[in-house]
Amino acid sequence: MLQLSSISSDEKSIQHERMNIVIVGHVDHGKSTVIGRLLADTGSLPEGKLEMVKDQCLRNSKPFEYAFLLDALKDEQTQGITIDSARCFFKSDKREYIIIDAPGHIEFIKNMISGAARAEAGLLVIDAQEGIQENSRRHGYMMSMLGIKQLAVCVNKMDLVGYRWEVFDSIRREYGNFLREVGIDPQAFIPVSGRNGDNIIGPSPKTDWYKGFSVLEQLDCFQKESPRVDKPLRFPVQDVYRFTGYGDNRRIIAGRIETGKVSVGEDVIFLPSGKRSRIAGIEGFNRAAETTASAGQSTGFTLETQIYIKPGELMCKSGELQAKSSTHLRVNLFWMSPQPMIKKKQYKMKLANMQVPVWLTKVKSVLDASELTTSSNRQQIERHDVAECVLESLRAVACDEANDIPQTGRFVIIDNYEIAGGGVILQAEESTDTLLSEHVRQREKSWDHSSITQGVRSGRYNQRSALVLICGSVGTGKKELAKALEEYLFNCGRLVYYLGVSNSLLGIDSDIKATNERDEYLRRLGEVSHLFTDAGMIFITTVSDLDDLELEIIDKLNQPNDMVLINVGEGGFVRRKPDLSLEKVDLASLQKIHELLQRKNYLVEYNL
């Protein structure tokens, strides 16, 4: 990533207001030239940079372009197009700016999405001679979709049209109407020449008919977003670190606070699992202990109650507006892959630190972003389409509506290890008709059931079938307990089977591991459980660090057969209470489980 700045270390020590601006536009409309001119005319280039680039152009017999100040990579200059998001820094008398140069070529729109996602306002560049292009409209719609409402339009290359007012006014009227249709009220249209510096940092006598602000003056008119610290707490969990050396037993939950603030002693909830605890400490590497952490800070937390938290969960503060959790997300999606997005195909959604498999289940409408025409009854989403659709996952996703908290309301879709789409969440919908429920219904509908019923099997075996699922943390003795239980019940004459599951036993290969091993592992375990319990057996297996959401997947896939839940050690579940909780595995554990199965009539006893 290219970074240009002439701010000295002394100047950096002074606290200035800072704003992120994204600049977009069709290929060859002059974005990089406008930025290069801003850098040069505000004195923001490193000393000697301008002269160095001019000398390079002279040696290569190439005419100097201000764009070369930004397009510093050799392959970018060769192609003549900016192919990656580049950041540059400069200052006005009012504030410091970070300008994100987002690509204009249609092949690189996905880079524009990642660039614009960090911006508070935007500049959109249109070539006065070439006029409004299809990509100009797409970029305007993307800015609206990403929630960037502060926008100024630079009508560039006015020198090529003789600085004529009627050319500028025609673009202003046509594109202004388009932007208002997509929900953006542009703050200004500015006639500029990036090459000659007209209206870049001050008024130009060549456009004496224009009485508005220059580009720099318009940037200073943009309003800063309200501090993210004033919003509800959102802390996506990046990872959990456990320290065991020198008697250190801390479990540190690490990540970056996106919005809000939290202090030691405050109650928090993790979504979508619903687990609750209280902040015991705020941790940082090689720094003094703190009692409060706020938005923008990368930090770690310890909790008073040791609960098992997975990376990707979202920590919120109790008593504040909390994120939504749902398996059904209504979204606005921009599709970029050459291959259409289709139903019944698994994709991966990346939202904050969560990665989860999703499926396209409904296409509500598809918008042509350049013409603003819509079509319905579409069954797939084609390249460059903007669609309002419903994405569904097997497990609930914790998120916010993008208009409320963009940091946890924007996502990208991965297909075959490539970014294939991106979008914003409109609503987390409630639905009882899930992919998993539909799968179970279709499975039961298609199942060629045996003429031997469950009742007949129960009478023959003197038992009712059940999945006995033993859960708990790693190292609690679950495996030893499960094997001992199988042997104990077998010696009692029961039809029982213990499956010491592993990825290889369930047929999970390296490709599946790379996508989402855990979810696929649980899905296959649920299907295997259904086979054993349908055969009338007591099926015993173990899963480490299971949460409520994962438990629901196994339970639903095992239906209509029963599940008996046994938890070993601390932690446990929020929504479902275990049928039996064991503090530890000991000699009495087998007897307790045996009595539980008898009490629930899974083991039928006959006394003559």
Image (cartoon, rainbow, N blue to C red):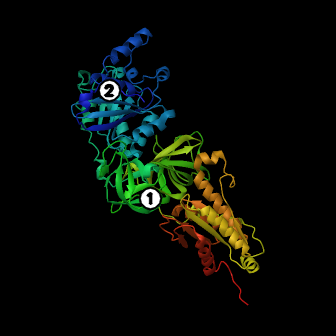
* Number of dots carrying numbers: 2
Q: In this view of the protein, which residue sits in the foreground, 304 or 310?
A: 304
Residue 298: give its label.
none
Work out whether residue 494 can be spotted.
no
Q: What residue does disc 1 label? A: 271
Task: Quadrant for residue 179, please give it.
Answer: top left
Using a 10 Å C-alpha cutoff, classify the residue at mark 1 as few (fewer than 14 neighbours), some (14 to 19) or many (20 or more).
many
Q: Position of residue 31 (x, y in %)?
A: 38, 28
Left or right for 168, reference 592:
left
Residue furthest bottom as drawn: 608
Q: Residue at x 31, y 26 (%)?
A: 38
Q: Residue at x 46, y 35 (%)?
A: 135
Vertical side of 195 occupied by 496: above or below: below
Residue furthest front as drawn: 246
Marks 2/1: CA–CA distance: 40 Å
Q: Amino acid at mark 2?
A: Ser
Vertical side of 204 occupied by 319: above or below: below
Q: What residue does disc 2 label? A: 5
Using a 10 Å C-alpha cutoff, classify the residue at mark 2 as few (fewer than 14 neighbours), some (14 to 19) or many (20 or more).
some
Q: Position of residue 537 (x, y in %)?
A: 71, 71
Left or right for 327, reference 342:
left
Left or right for 606, reference 267:
right
Label 2 or label 1, whichever comes before in sequence order = 2
Task: Quadrant for residue 608, please give it.
Answer: bottom right
Q: In this view of the protein, which residue sits in the foreground, 376 or 570?
A: 570
Determine the secondary structure under disc 2: loop
Q: Position of residue 499 (x, y in %)?
A: 68, 62
Q: Do callouts 2 and 1 mark residues in contact (Cβ within 8 Å)?
A: no
Q: Amino acid at mark 1?
A: Leu
Q: Residue at x 62, y 55 (%)?
A: 521
